[in-house]
Image: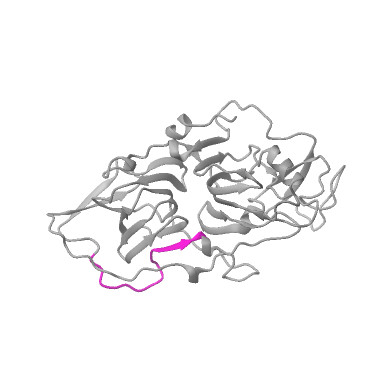
Amino acid sequence: MESFVHLRKGRTPKRLHADLDGLKDDELGRGGFTGRTANIYRRNDPTAYRSAGPLRPVDVLSSELKPSDATDAHGGPLLLFSNADCQVSLSRRTEEMPFFVRYVDGDLLSFVHKGAGLLETEFGPLRYRAGDWMYIPKACTWRQVPDEESTLLMIQATDEFRVPPPGYMGRHFPFDPSQATIPEPAPIDDDGRDEYEVRLIHPSVPGGPTSLYYQHHPLDVEGWRGDNFAFTFNIDDYNVVTSNSVHLPPTVHLFMQATGIYVMNFLPKPAEGVPGTERTPWYHRNVDYDEIAFFHGGSLYGIPMPPGLISHAPQGVHHGAPEKARERARRKFDEYDKVDWSVIAIDARRRLVPSAEVLANDLGQH
């Protein structure tokens, strides 16, 4: 039961996530680090196991995956993971879309891992670059025109993405919406073709996509008003919340959320400076959420992080930074004063199902 008084039994450090003295810090908590919690101190690494069965961590390099839009202008993104609340896909488009798209099952939130280009939307044109989040409202018509090969991690919700409710720090921290780039209307004239294809993307209805054909350009919007619109937001403008004495839980870095889906930015920040503080995420088993980590780049105390690595940890299965990374962070405590990483995290309340392509390219670390 919940209590203001948290019990302490056996050998435990005085401070949370600090002064472990050889113990392994393992958190068993509900509600994605916001509910009831037990911090369990073990003798051994809880991720040192051999897995058999469907619930196992999966690690795959996105560069080894082959979305059809990478080689065919008429192709589309590759499905990576899915559940009843979302679909997570990978796009690596090199040519402009010869068609338009409209995601009709829910909002679309995409992260630009590599590349630059233009999104033509009903609300107007939006330039994009590496590190951008691109938000497209449900059923908005748009088209991608890349300047160069563009790798996108795409998250389609089954309802709408929202900015998290403001907490005690106020509505501008960590995500300041005033830093978003909002398009100006720019109607596009017909270019002489007989018709314009708009593909409706609807994973909830088998047999898709559905194509609509217009005799006029679908992006003919002269103006708009309201509070439902497309935008981009770059992670360079995200306000990172830090602590000097304890490694903060992932939920502190929440960016946007939809029903059953939480999206977070783990970005470069000052390292915890109080001696004895653990600087790496503690072991945990995602009791109520499946977790996807997408490594955009950087390093962890001198250990390079493979750009484009996608890691999936099912709820109930231990995971965390490798023990060698923890030991290095302790050993090199005085040599590093910054965490140089950029990681996109997705927490899903329902279990995520990896696609066949993801399982076929699993690095087999478990």
Residue 338, position as x, y percentages in the image: 66, 55
Tell me, yes or no, whether the highlighted magenta stretch contains residue 78: no
* Span highlighted in magenta in the image: 220-235
Between 138 and 284, the residue placed more toward the observer is 284
Q: How many marks?
A: 0
Relative to 76, say whether 134 is above or below.
below
Tell me if residue 204 can be seen. Answer: no
Q: Is residue 85 above or below residue 164?
A: above
Residue drawn at the location 34% of the way across and 51% of the way down: 148
Q: Is residue 45 above or below residue 222?
A: above
Farthest right residue in view: 10
Q: Please state which of residues 19 and 318 is positioned toward the viewer in this rendering.
A: 19
| Residue 21 in the figure: left or right of residue 145 | right
State whether the magenta stretch is mostly helix, strand or loop: loop
In percent of width and height, residue 73 lies at: 27, 45
> Residue placed at 75% from the left, 53% from the top?
2
Please state if 148 lies on the left or on the right of 130 as rendered: left
